[in-house]
Image (spheres, rainbow, N blue to C red):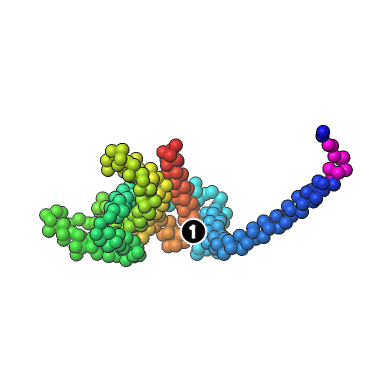
Amino acid sequence: MTVFSSPAAVTARAEPAVEARRAAPPARRAAERGETRAAYLFLAPYLVLFAAFVILPIGLGIWMSLHDWDLTLPGHAWVGLRNYTELFGGDSVTRQNFWQSMRATGIFTAMSVPLLIVIPLAVALVMNGRFRGRDVFRAVYFAPYVLGVVVISICWRYLLDSNIGVVNHYLGELGLPDQIAWTTSVPAAWFALVGVTVWWTLGFNAVIFLAGLQDIPADLYEAARIDGAGAWQRFRYVTLPGLRPVLQFVTVNTLIASANMYGQSLLLTGGAPGTTTRTAIVYIADTGLKNFDVGHASAMSFTLTVCLGLLSAAVFLIFRNRES
């Protein structure tokens, strides 16, 4: 026999549950608001610094690029996009020098990035092995990276000097050409810049690769050995797929760092011969800080930024396609 409750009884029983549901959301919302305030409180120092040293400079740079901004003059006339259009049209000296410096940046980046991926990866593979003196080996390869660009550039400038440098001296001892102008002729200057940069910074990328190698499960290598995979097959089908996120990070980071190369060009070759090895960052700094033409310097900076953004996006796209 089915017993039916009256509507009044059902309502009486449901009222406490309804009241509980009505009371719970405000309390939960209050707790969530408290958690949100606490999160923003902890984030506040970083947000303030980020706004002061990243957002504000970017906004000011964009504003300057839209003006005829000369640091030696009181007035800054609004010119709109003229500083940008002059970089892509006309025969101005600024346009010619800028794209020549962009070409130098492209040459250096194209030469250095592959080496700063392949060589550190090879070093990391060796450092990941078990052998006597492994810690000393790691320290030797990472040690140059802790030195500043000024120290590195000045030391190598003397080592590569065509008259008193020991590099040419030992080349002569080996019966090789010993009168190479490493810092004042091309392509020798490019080899000097790339070689010094690779020697100086490969330790950083090697450490990143080493961390990635140590995150690959050893079970995968053991399974590959059981299946009869050789060393190259294990590297191709286990190591490289396991390092894909690390490779993406290293590629993008190295690409940006190489495109922003400044100290080596300034201190090692001085842009010689002529302005052949003067990179875009060096020319932008000279335009803004020596010639006080901040408007054009800002426009060139954002043009370089857009180019780097497109290259980085291309790298992400390439790695994403490989994952799929």
Q: Which residue is drawn at 16% across and 59% down?
A: 170
The residue lying at 85 percent from left, 47 percent from top is 12
Please tell me whether residue 7 belongs to the stretch shown in magenta: yes
Nearest to the observer: residue 27 or residue 250:
27
Which quadrant of the structure image shows residue 172?
Answer: bottom left
Type of the residue with mark 1 = Val
Measured as percent of width and height from the top left, residue 240 is found at 35, 44
What residue is shown at x 19% (from left), y 64% (from top)?
Answer: 164
User: Considering the numbered disc 1 on the image, is that residue within a helix, a strand or a loop?
Assistant: helix
Residue 194 visible to the viewer: no
Q: In this view, does 189 lie to the left or right of 33?
A: left
Report the magenta residues as a range: 3-11
Could you say which is closer to the camera, residue 195 or residue 90? 195
Please identify the quarter of the rendering in which residue 43 is found. Answer: bottom right
Residue 120 on the magenta segment: no
What is the quadrant of the C terminus in the image? Answer: top left
Depth check: give the residue in front, 87 or 262. 262
Quadrant of residue 283 within the rendered picture = bottom left
Q: Where is residue 60 in the image (x, y as percent from the top left)?
A: 55, 58
- 183 up-or-down from 241: above or below: below
Dot 1 corresponds to which residue? 294
Callout 1: 10 Å neighbours few (<14), some, many (20+)? many
**Residue 1 picture location, percent across and down:** 82, 33
- Residue lying at 44% horizontally and 62% vertically, measured from the top left: 289
Q: In this view, does 148 lie to the left or right of 186?
A: right
Q: Can residue 284 be seen at all in this image of the molecule?
A: yes
